[in-house]
Image (spheres, rainbow, N blue to C red):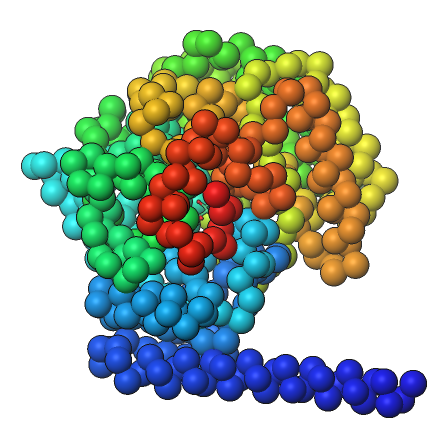
C-alpha cells in the first residue's frame, strides 16, 4: 500500500516537472522572437499573480504553464503561429470574467494576456469609439460619456468589452441599442494562421457576422470599433433600488408581466433573490433603470412603490455611473474580486408565466431553507426591453435568441468546497423546472454553464453557418475553448 502511495506521488512529481519544463521551453522559444516590451511569465514567477490578469471565477477554469503578455500586434501573431505550429493550446484573456465550464478543456496551455492592448479613443464627430482587446467597460465609460455619447455596456463595469462583444454583450442600454455586438463596426483579428485581418460589413463580412455573437471561435482580437449614440436626457438615468420580502414575489411578477409587449425601451427591470441571514428568508432586490426623465421613471415604478419596499434608494445619475451604482453597488464591489468559485445555471425565458415563476420562487425559498450550502447563491431575473434587440434581424449576426423576455441566472457561490454537489444538483433542478415550462433550452452564451451545447448557445440555424465559417478560418480548431461551435 505504502509503495502504491510512493508511486502515485512520484508520478505527480514527474507530471509537474514535465509541465514546468514545457512552460520553460515555450518561454525560451517565444522570448527570442517577441518584441522587447512583451513579457513572459512562468507560474512560479513573482509577477504572475499581479501582472497577469487573474480570473474572476475559478470554477472549471483553464490551466496554464506559461503566460505571455504581447506588446504589439505582431507579437500576438507570433504567439498564435507558434502555438498552432507546435500544437500547444492557448487562450486569449481580456477582462478575465469568462466563466463557461468549457474553459476547463484548456489544460496546461499558454495564457495570451491581452493586458497591453488598452487604448480607448472616442470620436464624437464620427460617432465612433475604438478600443484595444483588453479594455474593460470601466475604461471606456468615462471617455464615452464625457464625449456626450453612450454605448450599451454590461451590468458590471469590470467585464472586458471584447470578451463581452464576442458573445453579444447585454446591459441596461440594450433595450435602446441592442447587444454591444450590434454596435460593432469593425474588428482587427489575428486568425489561426497568424494573419491579422480586418472584419467589417465590407471586409470579410461573413467572419464579421460570426464574430458578433460567437467570436471566441475565430481568433484573437487586437482592437474593436463601435458606433456610439446621443443618449436621451443627456445621458442621465434613473436608478431605483428597493428591497422586498419574498412573500411579495407574486406582486413583483405581476409588475414584470405587465410590461410584456409594451416595455418602454428606456426601462430595464431586474429582480435578484438572495438569502437574508437575519429573517432566514429570501430577500428580493428590485433594480429598475430608466434612461429618461426622472419624473417618467418614477411614474413607471409607482406600482412597486405602492408595495412599500422596506428599503428604497432612487438616484438620477450619468449613465457611466449606473453599473457601479445599481443594486446598491453590490455587483460592482464583488466584480473586482478574483478566484471565487461560482457555479452558473442559466436559462432564457420567452414569456413571463406567472404560475411558473411563483412555483420557481417557492422552489428557491424551500431549497434555501433546507440546504444551507445554497445560502451564498444569488438568482437574478433580468428583463430588458425588446426594442433594441429587434432593431437588428436574426440574420444580422451570430448573436441569437433576440426574443428573450427574461434572463434567469443562478450564480451558485461555493463558500465551502464540500458544498459543490448540493449547489450543482439544485442548479440543475432549478434550470430543469424553468426549461420544462418554456419548452426551450436556449441560454445566453456568456451566462452558460457550458454543458448546454452549441445549439443552445447559438441557435440551430446559426450553428450550421458557424461551422462552415469555422472550416474556412479555423479548420484545426485552435480557438475551441469557450463555448465551441
Ligand atoms: C461579474 C460578472 C458580470 C457580468 N455581467 C455581464 C453583463 O452585464 N452583460 C453581459 O453581456 N455579460 C456579462 N458577464 C459575462 C461576460 O460578458 C463574459 O463572461 C465575457 O466573456 C467576459 O469577457 P472578459 O474579457 O472579461 O473575460 P475573459 O475570461 O478574459 O474572456 C472570455 C472569453 O472571451 C475571449 N476573449 C477575451 N478577450 C479576447 C480578445 N481580445 N480576443 C479574443 N478573444 C478574447 C477569451 O478567450 C474567452 O474565450 C458578466 C460576467 C461576470 C463574471
User: Which residue appears at 54% of the width and 56% of the height?
Assistant: 103
Quadrant housing residue 439: top right
* Residue depicted at 68% across the width and 26% down the height: 434
- Residue 475 percent across, percent down from the top left: 40, 52
Q: Position of residue 27 (x, y in %)?
A: 39, 82
Query: In this view of the protein, which residue sits in the foreground, 433 or 318?
Result: 433
Above or below for 243 versus 255: below
In the displayed structure image, the side of residue 206 where residue 175 appears, left or right = right
**How many numbered discs, if any?**
0
- The residue lying at 28 percent from left, 85 percent from top is 32
Percent x, y of residue 405:
51, 21
Quadrant (top left/top right/bottom left/bottom right) for the N terminus:
bottom right
Residue 116 shows up from this direction: no
Residue 378 versus residue 284 in the image, above or below: below
- On the image, the x and y values in percent for residue 193 come to 30, 60
Q: Does 261 sit above or below residue 319?
A: above
**Res 92 quadrant in image:** bottom left
Amino acid at each position: 500500500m505504502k509503495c502504491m502511495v510512493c508511486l502515485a506521488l512520484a508520478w505527480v512529481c514527474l507530471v509537474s516537472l514535465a509541465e514546468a519544463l514545457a512552460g520553460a521551453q515555450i518561454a525560451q522559444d517565444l522570448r527570442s522572437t517577441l518584441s522587447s516590451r512583451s513579457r513572459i511569465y512562468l507560474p512560479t514567477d513573482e509577477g504572475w499573480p499581479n501582472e497577469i490578469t487573474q480570473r474572476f471565477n475559478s470554477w472549471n477554469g483553464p490551466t496554464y504553464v506559461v503566460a505571455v503578455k504581447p506588446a504589439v500586434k505582431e507579437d500576438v501573431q507570433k504567439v498564435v503561429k507558434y502555438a498552432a505550429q507546435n500544437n500547444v493550446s492557448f487562450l486569449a484573456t481580456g477582462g478575465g470574467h469568462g466563466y463557461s465550464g468549457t474553459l476547463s478543456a484548456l489544460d496546461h496551455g499558454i495564457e495570451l494576456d491581452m493586458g497591453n492592448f488598452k487604448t480607448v479613443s472616442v470620436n464624437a464627430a464620427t460617432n465612433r469609439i475604438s478600443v484595444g482587446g483588453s479594455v474593460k467597460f470601466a475604461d471606456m465609460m468615462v471617455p464615452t460619456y464625457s464625449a456626450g455619447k453612450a454605448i450599451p455596456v454590461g451590468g458590471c463595469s469590470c467585464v472586458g468589452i471584447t470578451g463581452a462583444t464576442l458573445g453579444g454583450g447585454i446591459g441596461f442600454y440594450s433595450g435602446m441599442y441592442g447587444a454591444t455586438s450590434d454596435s460593432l463596426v469593425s474588428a482587427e483579428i489575428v486568425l489561426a494562421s497568424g494573419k491579422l485581418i480586418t472584419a467589417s460589413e465590407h471586409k470579410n463580412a461573413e467572419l464579421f457576422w460570426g464574430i458578433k455573437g460567437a467570436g471566441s471561435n475565430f481568433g484573437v482580437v487586437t482592437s474593436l470599433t463601435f458606433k456610439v449614440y446621443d443618449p436621451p436626457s443627456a445621458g442621465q438615468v434613473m436608478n431605483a433600488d428597493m428591497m422586498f420580502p419574498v412573500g411579495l414575489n407574486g406582486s413583483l411578477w405581476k409588475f414584470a408581466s405587465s410590461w410584456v409587449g409594451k416595455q418602454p425601451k428606456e426601462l430595464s427591470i431586474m429582480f435578484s433573490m438572495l438569502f437574508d441571514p437575519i429573517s432566514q428568508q429570501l430577500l428580493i432586490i428590485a433594480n429598475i433603470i430608466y434612461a429618461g426623465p426622472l419624473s417618467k421613471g418614477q411614474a413607471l415604478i409607482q406600482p412597486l412603490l405602492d408595495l412599500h419596499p422596506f428599503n428604497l434608494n432612487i438616484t438620477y445619475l450619468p449613465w457611466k455611473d449606473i453599473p457601479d451604482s445599481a443594486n446598491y453597488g453590490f455587483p460592482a464591489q464583488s466584480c473586482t474580486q478574483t478566484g471565487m468559485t461560482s457555479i452558473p445555471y442559466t436559462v432564457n425565458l420567452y414569456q413571463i408565466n406567472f404560475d411558473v415563476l411563483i412555483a420557481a420562487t417557492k422552489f428557491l425559498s424551500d431549497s434555501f431553507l433546507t440546504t444551507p450550502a445554497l445560502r451564498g447563491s444569488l438568482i437574478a431575473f433580468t428583463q430588458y426591453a425588446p426594442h433594441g434587440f429587434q432593431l437588428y434581424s436574426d440574420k444580422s449576426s451570430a448573436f441569437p435568441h433576440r426574443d428573450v423576455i427574461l434572463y434567469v441566472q443562478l450564480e451558485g457561490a461555493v463558500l465551502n468546497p464540500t458544498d459543490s454537489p448540493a449547489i450543482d444538483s439544485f442548479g440543475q433542478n432549478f434550470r430543469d423546472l424553468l426549461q420544462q415550462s418554456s419548452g426551450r433550452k436556449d441560454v445566453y452564451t456568456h451566462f452558460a454553464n457550458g454543458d448546454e451545447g452549441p445549439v443552445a448557445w447559438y441557435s440551430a440555424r446559426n450553428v450550421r453557418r458557424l461551422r462552415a465559417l469555422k472550416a474556412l478560418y479555423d479548420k484545426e480548431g485552435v480557438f475551441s475553448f469557450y463555448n465551441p461551435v
